[in-house]
Image (cartoon, helix red, strand yellow):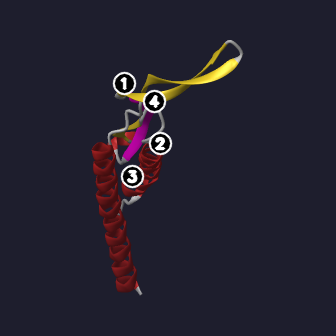
Amino acid sequence: MRIQSSPSMSALYSLAPSLQVTANNLANVNTNGFKAGVTRFETGPRDQGVRISEITKDAKPGAFIEHPLFIEEDGRVKQRMGWVESSNTDIAREFTNMISVEKAYLANLASIRTADEMLGSIFNEWA
């Protein structure tokens, strides 16, 4: 009997960068022109586990907001109101991602813990 925990371990290793992308998106929610990162997953080697296939930028534009702009005219810097693109980070999506990552992390930890307990039981039977 072979107990396999590597698919769960690969999931744990893949979930950490996903959470980092979400944290970066939330940290830059008020940064004008920021494009949110998106993490995509794929099945791991031999159809076991999961791994990150790519981390890309979301191409959707952010909302346009009125913002002060500093323009040089006649050797002087003047402030004028203009329109700039805000961050395209969707806070609701990011919090949903955080909850999903947390649940996936806990599920994979439970799987590893169960495999560990099973191995412990087998070793105790042999001893």
Disc 1 residue type (three-letter): Pro
- The CA span between labels 1 and 4 is 16 Å
Q: Which secondary structure, mark 3?
A: helix
Q: Which residues are magenta?
A: 50-61
Q: Is residue 3 visible?
A: yes
Give percent across and percent down for residue 30. Answer: 44, 41
Disc 3 residue type (three-letter): Ala
Q: Which secondary structure, mark 1?
A: loop
Residues at circles 1 and 4 in contact by the CB criterion of under 8 Å: no
Is 113 situated above or below 84? Answer: below
Decide which of tag 4 and tag 3 comes sooner along the chain: 3
Is 85 situated above or below 6? Answer: above
Q: Which residue is mark 1?
A: 61
- The CA span between labels 3 and 1 is 31 Å
Residue pictured at 68% horizontal, 12% vertical: 74
Q: In the visual, does 123 lie left or right of 74?
A: left
Q: Which secondary structure, mark 4?
A: strand
Q: Which secondary structure, mark 2?
A: loop
Residue pictured at 39% horizontal, 52% vertical: 11
Of tags 1 and 4, the one toward the viewer is 4
* Magenta segment includes 56: yes
Q: Which residue is mark 4?
A: 67
- The CA span between labels 1 and 2 is 15 Å
Label 3: how many Cα within 10 Å (few below 14, some 14–19, many 20+): many
Give percent across and percent down for residue 110. Answer: 31, 67
Decide which of tag 2 and tag 4 comes sooner along the chain: 2
Residue furthest to the top: 74
Q: Which residue is mark 3?
A: 11
